[in-house]
Amino acid sequence: MGYTRGDKKRFIYRFQDFVQQRSVNFTNVKKFHHPRFGVAPNWHSVLYPTYPNIRYIAINRYECTRLLEHGIEESQIFTIPNCIDQSIVPPDDRSVELRKIIIEQERLDQEVHYILYLVRCVRRKNVEEVIFFTCLLNSLAQGKLAHKNKHLEGKFHLLVSLRPTSGDEGRYADQLMDFVNKHKLPVSIGFDDLVSLEREMDPADPTRLKRYSVRDMYRVADLVITTNVLEGFGFAYLEPWIADRAVIGRSIPMITPDFQAKGMKLGHLYITLIVDRQDFRDIGQDKGSVDEALQERLSRISKLARPDFVDQVFARNETTMRATLRLFEKRTRNDLVTMNKKVVTDVYSQETEGRQLYKVVTSP
């Protein structure tokens, strides 16, 4: 972004990801050499110049800290979060028909409760953990907790929106679906043919939808979940509230505190999910390959058929489990949605971001 004030030019960089967070990209950056002298330039000074007419915008406090570590002066850094598209909710509600289609397509019970994970099914999205968590909810609903003091009603089915079909990502999704099909788990992955980013109307019938939007998927869901362990900004923690849906699942310590500082209530999210005395995401990390590690984590899902194991998981995560289970009470859930929706609409609106950007480009 460039800005001219009088005869002075200002350059404004907005950061969302850092190259060193992507190992392949970072390796390529370090390959560059000066064409004349054959030496590698200081990549810090190339990527993060510190001239007086340069300003940096970070999207959260964590990335602000990263810029400080790269030698950028604090006076040159501004923290402005991304804004949320508040038109995320479609003008008409087509969720009843979409729900019916999914039930028929996946052969589900009419009264099923949907847990939505609106992501592409790739390794860093930690999808095996959300499968574990969904199966844990079903075990509790079936009374498999030994003390039976937190019995949920109904059946819960996980919807993961996008399924890759090629490369390592496709193989990962295939491994998950092989496990799901083998054990007849309440999981569906991949609605690419049914859902797209925006609605697609049938040219032959303007009233008929060829593909629904992600906004329609939000409305179909009873709850939205995230178990991602790496987020650039964290839209998954903001968008669902606009669609009147609560978010459950894993907190990311370098992301969610920013939202809480603005007034959002996210205390029900867990930072760790302790299973067999370690965080679920770390199970199998001592194995020789990512595939062996994945199989170790998947094996814990099978153990949820045992009441003593369910009891153990609940006891080790009791505080956050109780906080999450309270959101299955409609009144509690609606109260939380109302509070968090107001924060999102006030703090993360396009209007608010516009005013903040204006201050940056016109500051002395």
Image (cartoon, rainbow, N blue to C red):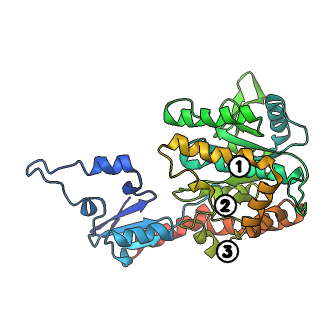
Within-10-Å neighbours for mark 3: few <14, some 14–19, many 20+? some
Label pair 2/1, CB-CB below 8 angstroms: yes
* Upstream in sequence: badge 2 or badge 1: 1
Alpha-carbon distance for marks 3 and 2?
A: 25 Å
Residue drawn at x 58%, y 44% as measured from the top left? 294
150 with respect to 73 (left or right): right
Question: Which numbered disc, 1 or 3, marks the residue closer to the eye?
Answer: 1
> What kind of residue is marked 1?
Phe
Q: Label 1 belongs to which residue?
A: 132
- Looking at the rendered structure, the secondary structure element under dot 2 is loop
- Looking at the rendered structure, the secondary structure element under dot 1 is helix
Question: Which numbered disc, 3 or 2, marks the residue closer to the eye?
Answer: 2
Seen from the viewer's position, the closer of residues 203 and 149 is 149
Residue drawn at x 71%, y 46% as measured from the top left? 301
> What kind of residue is marked 3?
Gly
Q: Label 2 belongs to which residue?
A: 273
